[in-house]
Image (spheres, rainbow, N blue to C red):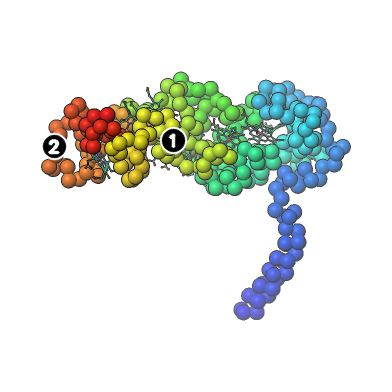
Amino acid sequence: MQTIVLIVGVASLLYGAVGSEQGQRIDQSQAAKLFARAKADDYMGDEYCVDCHAGISKNFKQSPHAALMVDPKLPADKRGCEGCHGAGGIHQADENPDVIAFRAMSPKESTAACMRCHASTLSDAHWKRSAHAKADLSCVSCHQIHPDVVPEWEPGSVQKGAAADPKNPVFTARIEPRTMLKADQATLCGQCHGPQVAEFRLASHHPIPEGRMQCSDCHNAHPNKNTKINRAADRDKCVTCHTEFQGPFVFEHDPVAGHTGAGCAECHKAHGSHNPKMLNSFSRGLCAQCHTEKLSRHYPGQSCWNAGCHVSSHGSNSSPIFLNP
Ligand code: HEC
Ligand code: HEC
Ligand code: HEC
Ligand code: HEC
Ligand code: HEC
Ligand code: HEC
Ligand code: HEC
Ligand code: HEC
Ligand code: HEC
């Protein structure tokens, strides 16, 4: 038994040595390998593709990407169809074509093929640390390059069975799709986050159904160089729009100022709520979650924030108990 372990051990040491010599090649993505194989005269230009892929070549002109990749000063491996799919000269158009076929690749390989050019938008490390990368999404889970290719929906991995249809948006007053997304955001994201999208149907909600906001106003679907790693919006984000509650106030209320608990989320739902003003609770239970002593000895009748009471519970410049602004 011990001998076998030893042999295996030695073998893997030897293999390790060989492996590290070739390490660089082993680590390369399929896309990088294909481009490494191409010689200068393998690049044929867009016209070459038209004969065999007429429809898609014609429609590609409407893709926002097309205009970004026509500049003749760009190196051949960053230009036109071949910038994404690889050099035409080595694309043997047979059963197993040597071409970058994003849909047929694993999510990691497909992402690597986009990242050849997008390292300036988001770094590899940014992407890999995002919840979406960890859940094995790829860039083409959300983005669509060719306007005419029918978008392929991934099976909703968070909520199954949500029959999202890009042509049939969940909210009709939606904002048009931007940034080459497969659909408007509520429909796209709702494919996998159905329960969260449904919260926007509650009586009090952020105006996504009305088309006045979208998910990316608060969330980074993926971080870029200017944003933090994929995480839910925090207090800083809320007060970028609700500046009146940013403070500083002469008399701060600890949870609003972010000193205790989850900030705004201590009292508000971020998406929507049955209660007015997206509150977690419609009455004094809201305040009693922290001010437990007030529950029995300090009964205000209605809510704690009706006229004459703590109407300025976000903070005040005149009243230490938030009776006035
Ligand atoms: C001589 C005809 C011919 C030419 C020229 C040609 N292709 Fe192809 N291509 C094919 C055939 C045949 C297939 C494999 C069958 C299929 O899936 O459509 C294919 C497959 C592909 C695929 C994979 C499709 C998939 O989903 O698997 C891509 C991407 C592609 N070609 C892009 C290009 C690009 C970009 C060019 C120009 C640089 C090009 N082709 C030039 C014939 C051609
Ligand atoms: C920015 C990268 C990019 C460029 C540039 C690009 N494509 Fe594509 N292509 C894709 C992606 C991604 C897919 C997978 C389908 C999708 O998500 O739109 C695809 C799919 C395809 C397919 C397979 C279609 C199918 O039904 O699955 C063909 C063929 C193709 N492209 C040809 C071309 C031709 C020809 C050009 C130039 C006119 C071109 N592509 C330019 C990224 C690109
Ligand atoms: C050959 C280089 C290249 C490749 C490969 C490439 N892109 Fe791009 N893409 C660009 C350039 C250049 C721009 C414009 C500048 C920028 O936003 O970085 C751009 C812009 C974009 C935009 C923003 C467009 C807008 O309207 O603001 C999206 C989204 C995008 N690319 C997605 C993708 C996806 C998804 C892939 C992989 C299927 C991909 N790209 C592959 C070069 C490329
Ligand atoms: C979960 C869905 C999703 C995935 C996966 C995704 N994106 Fe995006 N992407 C978006 C959304 C939503 C926006 C629009 C953000 C906005 O409008 O602020 C966007 C915007 C962009 C932009 C233009 C705006 C910017 O941030 O500069 C580029 C470029 C881009 N994505 C590239 C990529 C690349 C490359 C990948 C793969 C590494 C990718 N995306 C994966 C949803 C996604
Ligand atoms: C193809 C399915 C899919 C799509 C489309 C999708 N997501 Fe996700 N998303 C996931 C999965 C899987 C996770 C990780 C599991 C989880 O946290 O529930 C996730 C996680 C998240 C998280 C939690 C992040 C964290 O750090 O914990 C947020 C926020 C999110 N997605 C927002 C969005 C937004 C906004 C969009 C649309 C632009 C979107 N998602 C599109 C599948 C998807
Ligand atoms: C006003 C800002 C805002 C908007 C707009 C918004 N979200 Fe959120 N979202 C948040 C905050 C804040 C959280 C964290 C909530 C918490 O922890 O209680 C969150 C949490 C999430 C989560 C993670 C839930 C979990 O339990 O991990 C998902 C998924 C999500 N949102 C999806 C979406 C989608 C899809 C949209 C668009 C339809 C959207 N959000 C729009 C602020 C927002
Ligand atoms: C991108 C801007 C933006 C961000 C970020 C934002 N909001 Fe809002 N918020 C709005 C808009 C727009 C409305 C609707 C105002 C209206 O209808 O006049 C609103 C309304 C509200 C309301 C009142 C709802 C009602 O029924 O009257 C509350 C409470 C609220 N937001 C809390 C938050 C919290 C908490 C966060 C952080 C998780 C947040 N907002 C982040 C734009 C934003
Ligand atoms: C201690 C609980 C509490 C916290 C924490 C809190 N709020 Fe509120 N918020 C309330 C109450 C109570 C109301 C309802 C006031 C009313 O109806 O007069 C409200 C109302 C609002 C409104 C609607 C105002 C209007 O006039 O319609 C917005 C917007 C809002 N809050 C944003 C925020 C933001 C942003 C944060 C985080 C910086 C935050 N709140 C933190 C308790 C809280
Ligand atoms: C997440 C916990 C939390 C919630 C929820 C909360 N508070 Fe507070 N509140 C505090 C903390 C912490 C302080 C400052 C420390 C202290 O003295 O208790 C404070 C201080 C106060 C004060 C100043 C007087 C004092 O006791 O120091 C008033 C008045 C007050 N809160 C009212 C409210 C009202 C009204 C609500 C509901 C709208 C509410 N609070 C909800 C945590 C909370």
Residue labelled with disc 2: 299
Q: Earlier in the sequence, mark 1 or mark 2?
A: 1
Q: Is mark 2 within 8 Å of ligand 9?
A: no
Q: Is residue 163 above or below residue 31?
A: above
Q: Nearer the viewer, residue 141 or 54?
A: 141
State if disc 2 and disc 1 touch (CB < 8 Å).
Answer: no
Q: Is residue 22 left or right of residue 186?
A: right
Q: Nearer the viewer, residue 161 or 193?
A: 193
Q: Is mark 1 within 8 Å of ligand 7?
A: yes
Q: Amino acid at mark 2?
A: Tyr
Q: Is residue 57 left or right of residue 228?
A: right
Image quarter (top left, top right, bottom left or bottom right) of the N terminus? bottom right
Q: Position of residue 323 (x, y in %)?
A: 22, 31
Give the residue at x 40% y 33%.
Answer: 239
Q: Residues within 10 Å of mark 2 (few under 14, many from 20)?
A: few
Q: Is residue 63 above or below residue 230?
A: above
Q: Amino acid at mark 1?
A: Lys
Give the alpha-carbon distance from disc 1 to disc 2, as whole Å.
Answer: 34 Å
Residue labelled with disc 1: 237
Res 269 visible: no
